[in-house]
Image (cartoon, grey):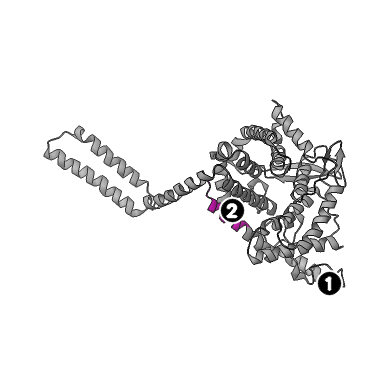
Amino acid sequence: MIDLQDISKAKTKIKDRFLDVCLNGAQTRKVQSVIDVQLLKGGNNIEGVQKGKDVIACGQFIDDQTRQQHGLHGIASAINVLCNADDQKSQQSVQRLLNYLSFRLNSNFYPDKLNSTIKISELLISISKIKDNPNLKSKLHDVFVEKLINGKNTKGLSCTWDYYLDTSENSNVYIPTSYAAMALSSVNALPKECDVFDGLKSEIEKYVRSQDYKTHDYSERILILYTLVFFNINNDKELMKLYRKALTKIWKETRNLFTNDIEQNLEYWRNNENKYIRIPWQLYLITISVKLEPIPIYSTYNIQNRLEKIIDLSLSSGFKYPHSGTNLSSRTNSILYTTLEKIEVEIKDSRIGFLYNFFGTVSKWKALSKSFFNHWITAFIGYVIGGSIISLSIILGLINDLAIEDLATEFLGAIVIIMLTRNIRY
């Protein structure tokens, strides 16, 4: 079982990477220079922005400080991670990231209209977690909520969102609808005239009942289930029972895929242009499992082994999906940070909390024993004991006139000790 201390260390490492790139990356210097030029030209007076240094930015990657690219996915990811840190530098950085958003909303420098459903949703989710700065937070909150509410598509009692708020050209919209539902639920701004969770629940119900379903769309189904489990305010016992059935079925389909780090790229259209969104479905599934089935699924070797490797990477070179590029994605690491957060919360409140206490103690003894048995002194002792048994057996055999077969047990035991000793690494 993964040690909670390792989870905490991995979160700190992720936070430090975000902080480093936001404060020292080329993208921040680029934005600061743009703001300084606009202010010199008598540009708009933006709340909280008196000079370029009042703003920092984040881009697609957190391990490359030479890129000037910066965007809303990166900003949302940085806020999501840094707003949970207690240190002063992180909290000041969150303020400067909010200043970036305020500048972007009030500046003509950026031509986009901020109409990506997923980007706005992730920004709103991140902003909802900020504890301080109520004024600027409230203004940004109102802007993003209004955009999502105005961009919904209503059909009967259900409402959905396309990938962009000004279009409805995609037939399958479960992904953007899930993100919009998470965002509006996180700030208690769900529309009253329609049920944002209705279509998502129907999709899970059809999947549970079906014997021959679209098994390749597991990432989409996992995201839907994640949204319902953690953000549906109307969950009851019957719905939780439905979710557990869906999780069990999904787990049977995907558990053999946990031997490697895998995410899925889902395609969609924008003005006849092909685009895609990455879904780190393994992280979402791990989070769901610790909430719904902490013992029969989360505690399995497949998940624990995958999670251990993810944490090991986070503590060393950084976590990334090897098939998605060589750099550390800010969005992926932000979602990983949220996964680790939710694991901590659920473990402390769930029925496997006692298992963590038990296995935590076992792991400490295991580490001590590993340290002892891999020491050269232990190897020397093993050789001495094995050699002494053989020597003593020979002497006793000569004294008592024993045949060689009478000493077989002693010889075998000594040989086993020596063979085990040979495997010691020191």
Which residue is at the front of the view, 78 or 27?
Answer: 78
Whether the magenta-drawn stretch holds residue 248 is answered as: no
Which residue is at the front of the view, 297 or 239?
Answer: 239
Residue at 54%, 45% (x, y): give it.
353
Amino acid bearing label 2? Ser
Mark 2 residue crowding within 10 angstroms, few (<14) / some (14–19) / many (20+)? many
Residue 383 in picture, x, y percent from top left = 28, 48
Residue at 71%, 27% (x, y): give it.
209
Residue 160: tell me if it is visible: yes
The residue most toward the bottom is 40
Q: Which mark is residue 314?
A: 2
Name the N-terminal-most of marks 1 and 2: 1
Q: Residue 210's quadrant in the figure?
A: top right
Residue at 20%, 36% (x, y): give it.
407
Q: Is residue 12 left or right of residue 71?
A: left
The boundaries of the magenta stretch are: 1-14
Q: Answer above or below: position of 88 versus 394.
A: below
Q: Is residue 201 left or right of residue 151?
A: left
Measured Cα–Cα span from mark 1 to mark 2: 40 Å
Q: Is residue 317 left or right of residue 57?
A: left
Residue 388 in picture, x, y percent from top left = 22, 46
Q: Look at the numbered disc 1 and give the secondary structure of its residue.
A: helix
Residue 10 in picture, x, y percent from top left = 58, 54
Q: Answer above or below: position of 42 versus 310.
A: below
Q: Residue 266's quadrant in the figure?
A: top right
Residue 307 in picture, x, y percent from top left = 57, 46
Whether the magenta-drawn stretch holds residue 2 is answered as: yes
Amino acid bearing label 1? Leu
Q: Are marks 1 and 2 in contact (CB under 8 Å)?
A: no
Residue of label 1: 39
Which residue is at the front of the view, 231 or 299?
Answer: 231
Mark 1 residue crowding within 10 angstroms, few (<14) / some (14–19) / many (20+)? some
